[in-house]
Every structure is written in C-alpha cells, then in structure tokens.
Amino acid sequence: MGIFSAITLFQASLVLYLVAALAALVFIKRHKLSNIVSNGLCILASLFGLISSLMHILSGEEKIVLGTFKSAIPYVTLNITIDKLSAFFVLILSILVLSVSVYSIGYVSHYYGKRNVGLLNFLYSTFILSMIFVMTAGNTVFFFIVWEAMSLISYFLVVFESEKEENQRAGTLYIIMTHVGTAFLLIAFMIMFSYTKSFDMFGSSAMIPIFAKNIMFILFLIGFGTKAGVIPLHIWLPYAHPAASSNISALMSGIMIKTAIYGMIRFMLVYLNIQQTWWGILILVIGATSAVLGVAYALMEHNIKRLLAFHSIENIGIILIGLGVSFIAFAQKNEPLGALALTASLFHSFNHTLFKGGLFLGAGSIQYSTHTMDIEELGGLIKKMPITALLMLSFSLAISAIVPFNGFVSEWLTYQSLFINIQPNQAGVNIASILAVAALGLAGALAVACFVKLFGISFLGTPRSNHASQAKEVPSTMNIGMGILAMFCLAAGLFPMIFIKVIDNVVMSMGTQSIMGNLQGGFLIAYYPLSVSGNSISPIGILTLIISVIFGLLVIIRIIGGKYVERKYGTWDCGFETLNSRMQYSATGFSKPLRIVLRILYRPGREIKLEEGVSPYFPNSIRYKVSTEPIFEKYLYVPILNITQKFSQKVKFSVQTGNVHTYLLYIFLAVLALMLYNRLA
Amino acid sequence: MINVIYILVQIMVIILVAPLVNGIINKVKAFTQKRKGAPLLQMYFDLYKLLKKNAVVSEVSSWIFKATPYIVFSTALAVALLVPVTTLIVPTGFPGDIIMLVYVLALGRFFMTLAGLDTGSTFGGMGSSREVMISALLEPSLLVAVFTVGLVSKSTSVYKMMEAMKNADVPLAQPVLIMVFFAILIIIIAETSRIPVDDPATHLELTMVHEAMILEYSGRHLALMELGAAIKQLVFITLLVNVFIPLDQYIGMTGISAVIISLLVYLVKVILVSILIAVAEVSTVKFRLFSVPNLAAFSFILSFLGFLQYSVFGR
C-alpha cells in the first residue's frame, strides 16, 4: 500500500471533489475564480479517479472495502465497496468528467454576472460525487441514500434556469418519474431484506425463492428502467436532459443514465444470479423497442438537445440488446456467449458516454455562440466554427456506428453476439434475436438520417438566421474538452482491443471465463485486430485502405487529368439568380419522407394558415406548422393520470369527508384491527 | 508478394468491369426500345473526359463537398476488396465481414448525403432526404438477409460464405436461399438507384434521388462519384453471384489457368445479372416515392421468411 495505490488515489479523488464543491461555495461572489478553481480541482480529481479505477481493474484484487460506518440502527452500515464493475463505471465517469470540466471552464463563462456560478459548480461537483457513491455503494441502504441524493441534485440542476416555465415543467415531470422508479427499487430492496435479513449488495441471494426473484427482477427492471429512460418509461428524459445547461446535460446523458445500467448488472445479473431465459428475452425486446422508437422520435425533433436526448433512449436500447443476449446466454449456461454479449453491452456503455457527452458539449458550443438550439435557425456554421464542426462530425459518425469510430465496434460485437445467439431448437429466442438484428439495423440507418440532418442543416449550407450568421468559434478550452472525447472515440474505434482487454477483466471478475480466447487478434496493429469465432473486422485496416486509395487516386487523377483547376461559382439556381437561405432544405423538410412513411407511429398533423393578399395565389404570409402526436403520453400516461384523479375525487368525497367523527371511527377501527392482528398472529 | 498481386488483380477487375455493367444495362434497355444505344464502353469515355475537365465548385460549399467524392470512391473500392471476385483470390489479409461491409458503405453514404446539403441547393437536400429514407427502409431487410446467409454458411465473413456455398451442392436449390436471393436482388435494385426506386436517366425533380445529390458535381469530382456508384453496384452484384451462384467448384484445374477461367466465369455471371437487372428495369415503371416502403417491406418479408424457413426446417 504505497502512496500511489488505487485506494489512496481514489480517496484523494473523493476529497478533491469535495474540496471543489466547497471552493465553489467559498468563492461564490467571485464567479470567474470560483469557476476556474472548482473545475480545476474536478479535473485533478477525475485524473486521480481515472488512474485509480484503471489500476484496480488491472490489479489482481477482487474488491476493496473502504470506510465502513456502523450506525446505531441495526443492520444499517454505510460502506463503500469497489469491485471491478464499480471501478469500470467510475472509469468512464472519470473520462467524461475530465473533458466536461475542461469544457466548463470556457462554457460557464457566459453565466458570469448573470447566474449563480458558485451554486452551479457546487451542484456540479456534488452531482459527480453522488454518482461515484452510487457506483461504489456496498449495501442497499447506502445505495438508496446516494441514489436519492443523485436524483435530487440532478433535479436542482434541471431547474437551474428556473425562470423558464418549460424547465419547471421538465423538473416536475423528472422528479415524479424518478421517484416512481425509486419506489419500485425500495420494494425490491425490502423483499431482498425480508428473505436474507441483510442489506449487503455483495451477499448471496441463494435464500430468495424463485418466485420472489422473478418479482424482484420486474421491480428492478421498472425501477432502473425509469432512470435509464427505456420506452415506455422514457417520457421525462427528452424534457429533463435539454433543460439543464449543456455541461450538465452531457453528464446526465453520458453517465447518469448509465448508473441504471450499472444497477441492472449489479442487482439483476450479479446479485440475483439466476437469469431465467425469459428475463433475457424481455430485456432484449425492451431494448430493441427503445432503440427503434428512440431514434424514430429523435428524427422528428428540431431542438438539438432534445434530439440528442432521444438518441440516449436509442443507445440505452442498444446497450440493453447486448445485456439481454447475455442474460439469455447465462441462463442457458452458455458462458462464452454471455461474456461476449456483456462485453458488447459494457463497451457500448463506454462508447455512448464518449460520443453522447461530446455531442451535448457540441450542442452547448452551438448555444454558446448562436444562442439558439433550433436547427431550423442554424446553417453554415462549418465556416464560422470549423473546429467545433469537425468535432461534431466525428461524434456524429461515432454515434451512427460508422467505421472507423467506436460506435461501430460495439455495435458489431452486439451483432456478433446476436448471431451466435441464434441456435437450433429455440424458436422464441431466435425470433427475438433476428428481430433485434432488424431493429438494430433500422436504428442504425435512422441514426444516420438523423445525424445527417443535425450536421447537414446546422453546419452546412448558408445561415438561416442572424443567430447563425453572427456565430464565432468558441473558446479553446471548450474545444479541448470536446477534443479529449473525440480522441477517445477514435482510439476506441481503431484500437478496440486495448479497451476490450480492460472490459474483459471486469467481465471475468463476475465469475465468467475470459473472452480473450474467443475474441482473438493482434494487440495494436494487425490485419484483424478484432475477431469473434472466426469473423473478424479491422477498422484500422479499412482506414489504412481508404487513405491509401485516396492517395493513389490523387496521383492517378493528376496523371490522367492534369492539374486541378477549380472555378468558384454560385449554386445552380435554375437561372433565377435569387437563391437565398430560405430556399434551402429545412430540417422539417428533410425528415418529411420518413415522417410520412412512419406516420402510423407519429400520427402527424399539419396546420397551414394563409393570409391572403391581392390574389389567393400570392398570399402575404403563410404559416406552416407540423406536429407529431406523443402516443405514449396520450394513450398511456394521460389515461393513468385520469384514472388516478377520478379515484382521488371519489376518495375525497366518500372517505375523506372532513367529518371529525368519521376520522375517529377510522382510528378506532385501525387500533382494533392491529390488536386483532397481534392477538391472532 | 502474392497478396499484392491478388489485390492488384481484384482492383483491376473491379474498376474495369464496373462501368461495363452500366454499359450492358443501357445497351439492353436501348435494344428493348429498338434504339441502337450508346456504345458498351461509353462510360469509360465519359469518365476520361470528365477527368480532363475543370471542376466548378459552389461558393457556398465547404471542404465536405470536395472531400466527398474521394471518400465515396475509396469506401466503395475498400469494400470491393472485401468481396473476392473469385474464391481463388483472397484480396486482403483480413477476411471481410459482411456487417462491416454495410457500415463502411454507410460512411460513403453519410458523406454523400452531407454533400447534398452542403451547397445549399434544394435539389441536393431533396436527394439526401430521399436517400436516407430509402436506405433506412432497406437496412433491416439487408441485415436479416445477410444474417440468414450467415447462418446457412455458419459465418458472417464474405469469403467464408463463398467457401461454404461452394461446398454446398446447389445452393439455389435450398428454399431459404431462393427467398434471400430475391430479397437481396430487390435491395440491389434500390441501393444502386435503379427503376423502380430511382431512375438513373432522369433529371426531373419529382423522380431523382441519387442524381439530385450529385447535381452540383462536375469534372473529376463527378467522375469519382459516378465510378464510385458503379463500383458499389458491382460489389453488390459480386456478392450476389459469388454467394448464391458459386460455379468455382466446377473448375477442376489449379494454378494460373484456373484463376483466368474463374475470372471468365465471374464475368459471365455478372453479365447475366446485369441483363436481369436491365430486364427488371425495362419491365417496370418507376414507383411513386411513397410506394418504395412496400417494396422494402416485401424484401424484408422475403428475408424474414427465409430465416424462419431455415430455423424451422434447416434448409
């Protein structure tokens, strides 16, 4: 145990986050100082966290128990336990926090003198701290406390710009939904305690009978599913994530919803440790549904941050597809496949943190310099903000699972695990798997459509408003913050083996065998760095090939065609010479074909208002409004709400009459019932 | 050393045959319309001429516009190297994975659709918007189809698929493969911008998809876009003929002569499929854009039924 052991570094990082939070409060009056000191400390803390978690994953140690605090209440101890799974999630959190903190130094500067920057940074640091505790809690009581703390702090961050009514509504929706989810978790923890008489998350679940495990599985699925934002529990997510400021959105979308994935793996896979086949199929189906519907709704959004929030639902779906396959495989004692699918799932969690964090930061950069989030008002930003544009393009390619970025590798692993999952004599699993393949393909292609829209409409063409034409490149700290994430995206795409090796250690620690035998290949540069049972890919090989073809082309074209002569001229305007920015394709127009094709899902409505001029053919103004119907709100939540309200009304009139005598009767009956119960039991 | 020769042979065959496919299709179309039609080798002359011309670039566009032709061409060629023209040639060290093939082509498509939006022209946006719709509708069918072929041949690697099919007796006699064959044929027609999904010969804004996206291109950029599209078309055809109609097993020779004969066999197969595509093109009319989902659904159902057939009956 030297000074540089994993545990001391981890403790140091916790202390540094705490100091960062306090520093933000101490300098609350001096916005710039508070911002720089607090974020600087967070950068340092995240570096410590990164190194310590990596050290722990690669070490031989199984788990570290840190600071057990026994309280006066029986059974209740508070402790921090870090095993490899926890360390993995702390690792991805640290990478994200590192870049978001660098980014925040520049980004938060637009709040100077306008908002309480000290409070923002205090909440920022405590939010990170609460997430680390969620990932490292050793028993369910402590887990529950920090889970609740995380929800509350994120609520405060959602309503940080509280004067906007939409933010208040988003916050209210968020806190209600998150508490509904928490209630399910609470019931599950109570069932757990009633059978095992212990709050220990790392204990054995052997004493719990199978039917109780099934109930707990459903409870966990709803509880964590709400936090993860799976469909149909997603309704809070597209409102809450965009409401927060962009650096917070990056954390919420990048890592907060991953705490739910962590919870699912920790409680459903590791703790309950049975895994019936139908659990996996259920997760697979939910994952496939979320993937397709998430991206389908994203396609109709023209607010950049809300679009990205819907993409979080899609990616959680992809993560759950991998997780579902691993559940099925573990239930059938097919350990190599289980390990492979779990690796795919964890790798996609990691990748999603990188590119989604980056995309939200990019959205923040756009907001910083154009003060709008509406794609329809942007355009031509690639010339005003070249670096931001390049970074956003990389993240867009990564999230669309396009070679050579990281999203492709984890989706490929998911495809391969689905491929291996299809085996003779199991019709249900096979059909679920092939439909998941189709869903994954559809989600991938729709993601391409969505990000072509996002990047093409906002960065290319000509500016559609003054906001866009007056945009300027953002401060370099913001670009550096995003650049760190882009580097990781490219590195994880080109050298996936390094990252999979780390994840393999995590998966192995859960009692399965290593997948490195199944998943072979060279370490860095080889023909096929990644190979699953004979099927192999080489992103770096393909990239080398593409680059060498381009160089070869340049030479050959020079020989055949001579020197490159270019003539700059206006875009083809059919000879009218009045092409303006409003004649470009808009985001609404771009997504229209798919809106029509998927109309059964969107149920689009449109409204055209004409203000007539001299002739009906030359109106003075036209307003065109297109809307889509939120089917889950309308057909699932509103009916539930109505039933609840009706029921409350009934209760109000028949039970809670306001009559003191009736209330006395209730108390009497309750005491009588309790006495009888005690007597009989 | 032998690898380098293989790669060169593969590149030469692909680049030389790709424009020929377009020539054959146009010749057959002209024949059915009782025209003489352009010479078979017209596309080579066009490409040569385009390469010598100056390029006109829109003032509005950014670096994406100029980078796109190179990316589209090189992704198509890179993918072509993953699909051997004959099983006797293994062009690259890594056996190409078919899922990777789909996603490398997506890189080219991503940039092509971006380039459509880059010039600020309505035509480009329209083309891009339609292209992403069509490709999104076909993607599930494509993946289910290649997964099913993968299940039959126990691998998702293109080369191993071809090897496995070569050892099967007569692949196309299996019901599963007949269904998947037609599913993939529909995808090829749609992906290569042919009637009834798109019309390569039109410049009418109501009907064009691929042509709308590349409307602003000229000179060498246009040449690269055209040749890239032709190569992509040939890659799909190669995939189809070499997986479903492997005739390599009947070549009882070894050495250089076997390679030459198998290349000739390959050429015959490509010509036959080109004629098939041309016949499909002349015997239908272009669909309304919003009828394309029906076609995609048909293709999806074929490949899904193929999958069910295989998982229930095993053949």
Image (cartoon, rainbow, N blue to C red):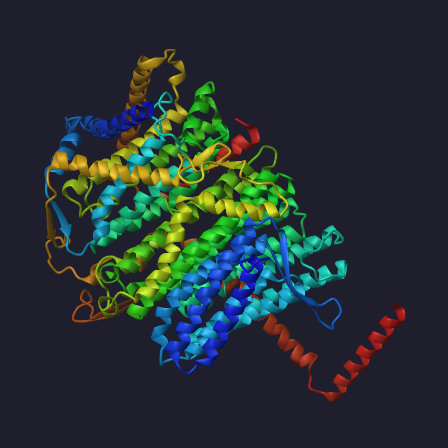
Q: Can the viewer see residue B117?
A: yes
In the image, B124: left or right of A360? left
Task: Please name whichever residue, A23 or B213, is drawn nearer the observer in this view of the structure.
Answer: A23
Farthest residue to the front: give it.
A2
Task: Please name whichever residue, A545 or A579, is drawn nearer the observer in this view of the structure.
Answer: A545
Task: Please name whichever residue, B33 or B62, is drawn nearer the observer in this view of the structure.
Answer: B62
Farthest residue to the right: give it.
A679
Give x and y (percent) for residue A89: 53, 56
Where is the C terminus of chain A found, in terms of image quarters? bottom right
B139 up-or-down from B160: above or below: below
In the picture, residue A461 is in which quadrant? Answer: bottom left
In the image, B119: left or right of B306? left
Q: Can the viewer see residue B300?
A: no
Farthest residue to the top: give it.
B252
Give x and y (percent) for residue A603: 42, 58
Give x and y (percent) for residue A481: 37, 61
In the picture, residue A112 is in which quadrant? Answer: bottom left
Residue depicted at x 31% and y 37%: A545
Where is the N terminus of chain A found, in terms of image quarters? bottom right
Residue depicted at x 89% and y 72%: A679
In the image, A644: left or right of A204? left
Residue depicted at x 25% and y 26%: B12
